[in-house]
Image (spheres, rainbow, N blue to C red):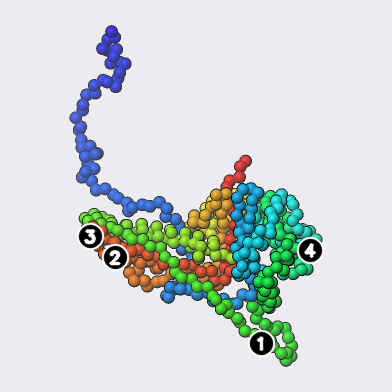
Amino acid sequence: MPSTEQDTAQNPAEQAIPEQNPSSLGTQAARNLATTTKTVPQMQGISSRWLLRKLPWVNVSGGTYRVNRRLTVGVGRGRVSFDQSGADNVRIIPQTLRELPTLRGFPDDDLLTALAAAFTPRDFAAGDLLAQEGAPVEEMYIIAHGRVELIGTGHYGSPTVVGVVADGHTLGDQTHARSDARWEHTVKAATAGTVMVISRAAFQRLLENSPALQAHFAAYLDNARRPRDNKGQASIELSAGHKGEEQLPGTFVDYDLTPREYDLSLTQTVLRVHSRIADLYNDPMNQTEQQLRLTVEAIRERQEWELVNNREFGLLHNAEYDQRIPTHSGPPTPDDLDNLLSMRRSTKLFLAHPKAIAAFYRECNNRGIYPDAANVDGHTVPAWRGVPIYPCGKIPISGVRTSSILALRTGEDDQGVVGLHQVGLPDEFQPGLNVRFMGIDEKALISYLVTAYYSAAILVPDAIGVLEDVEVSVPSR
C-alpha cells in the first residue's frame, strides 16, 4: 500500500486549503451599495440611412402626389422575361412580350402565346458575331442570358463599343415595323449565353393571320410618325436664325392625359407597455420613451428598405429600362460609373451596397486610381468625379453575388427624385411619423399606434439611373 504522503503528493487538488479571514469589504458585497452606471438600450441593425437623409422631402398634404409631364409619343422599351426548366428548356413568358414597343398594350394573350412559341433558343459563345453592321435585319433576338456588345464604326474607321446589353434586352425588333431595316451596329457576344430567335418570315405569317395584330401595328406606325424630340416627347415647333418677316410656326405644349399619382405608403406597428413597468421602473430612464425610440429606429430602417425595393414606388423597380445599363466586364469599374454619370445632368449622389463600393475600390486599385473622398455632414464618404457614393445595405445582393449601383438627381427644382411625406399629422412624433395613444386594455397594457407615412417619386425618367449586374465577389487568385 502506498503511503498517505504519496497520495497527497499525487492528488494536490485534494489537499485542504486553510480558510483565511478577509481583512476588507469584498467587491461583490460592495456592489450592493454602489450606483450602477447604465446605458440606454442598444440595438443592432441601425444604419446610417443616407437615402432618408439626402432625399429632399416634399409635403403631400392630400396624401397623393401627382407627377404631370409633357406628352410622350415614343413608347418605352421594357424587358422580356423567361421561364427556364433545365439547361436546354428556355421559354419566353408570353405576357412580357408587351414590353416590346411594337406590342405595348396588345390584348390578345393567345396570340402572344403563339408568338412566344415561335421563338427558338440559340446558344452562342464569347466572341461570336450575331449580326453585322449594315446587313439586313432578318431575325429578331431576345437575350435570355449573357452579355452582348454593340460595336459601331468610329470617326476614323476603327471599331468602337457603343453599348452593352444583357438579359431581357431585344435586338432587331424594328424589322416588324420596317421591311428595309438594317443593323445599325455589329452585335458581338462578350460572354457565352443564349438568345431567343424569330425570323422575319415566321413573324409575318403570324401577322397575316391576325387582323387584330395588323390593326395594332397600324396604330403603332401612325403614332411613330408623330413629330417628337430626342426624348420621345411631342415636339414643340420653333423657328431660329431667320431674318425678315418669316411666318412663325404655331405650337402648344401637350400634356400627358394620365399622369402618374403616388399615394403615401405606410409602415405601422402597435407598441405595448405594461402599466406596472411604466409606473414603477421609470427611473433613471423612461421605459416608454426607450421602447418608442427603438421602435422608431426599426420603422425608419424598414422605410428606407421600402424606398429602395418596393415594387410599386421603390427606386430599383421604377427606374426606366432605358436608364439601366449593365457593367462592361462584371465588377464596377471607373468606366461604368462614368457611363452612369453621362446619362443625366447634375447627378447628386450614388447609392451602393458596401460590398459594391469595396468592389469598385478593388478595380480602382488594379488601375492605380485613387477615388475621391467627400466630407458630408462631418463624415468622410467615398466619391467619384466629385459625386458622393453613399453606402446602402438595403440594396440587395443576388444569389450569384451581383448587386446594383444607383445614380440620382434629386429635388423638385431639378426634376429629380423626391421623398414624399406629410407633416402636421395628429400626434406627430417626427416629420411624417406619429404616435397615437390607443388606450389601456383589461390586462393593463398601454398601447400606442406608431405609423410612418412615406413614398418616393421620380419626376422625369432620367432622374435616376441604375448600373446592373455588378459583381461584388472577390475574384480567386
> Helix or strand or loop: what does disc 1 sit on?
loop
Q: Are marks 3 and 1 in contact (CB under 8 Å)?
A: no
Picture quadrant where residue 276 is located: bottom left
Which residue has dot 4 on it? Answer: 136
Quadrant in which the C terminus is drawn: top right
Horizontal side of residue 445 vs 108, given as left or right: left
Image x and y of residue 129, in percent? 75, 54
Mark 3 or mark 4: whose residue is earlier in sequence: 4
Check residue 438 in the rendering and tell me which mark sits there, or answer none: 2
At label 3, the amino acid type is Glu
Which residue has dot 1 on it? Answer: 250
Horizontal side of residue 433 vs 469, given as left or right: left
Q: Is residue 162 visible?
A: no
Quadrant in which the N terminus is drawn: top left
Q: Are marks 4 and 2 in contact (CB under 8 Å)?
A: no
Residue furthest out toward the front: 209
Which residue has dot 3 on it? Answer: 442
Image x and y of residue 87, in percent? 64, 48
Q: Is residue 259 visible?
A: yes
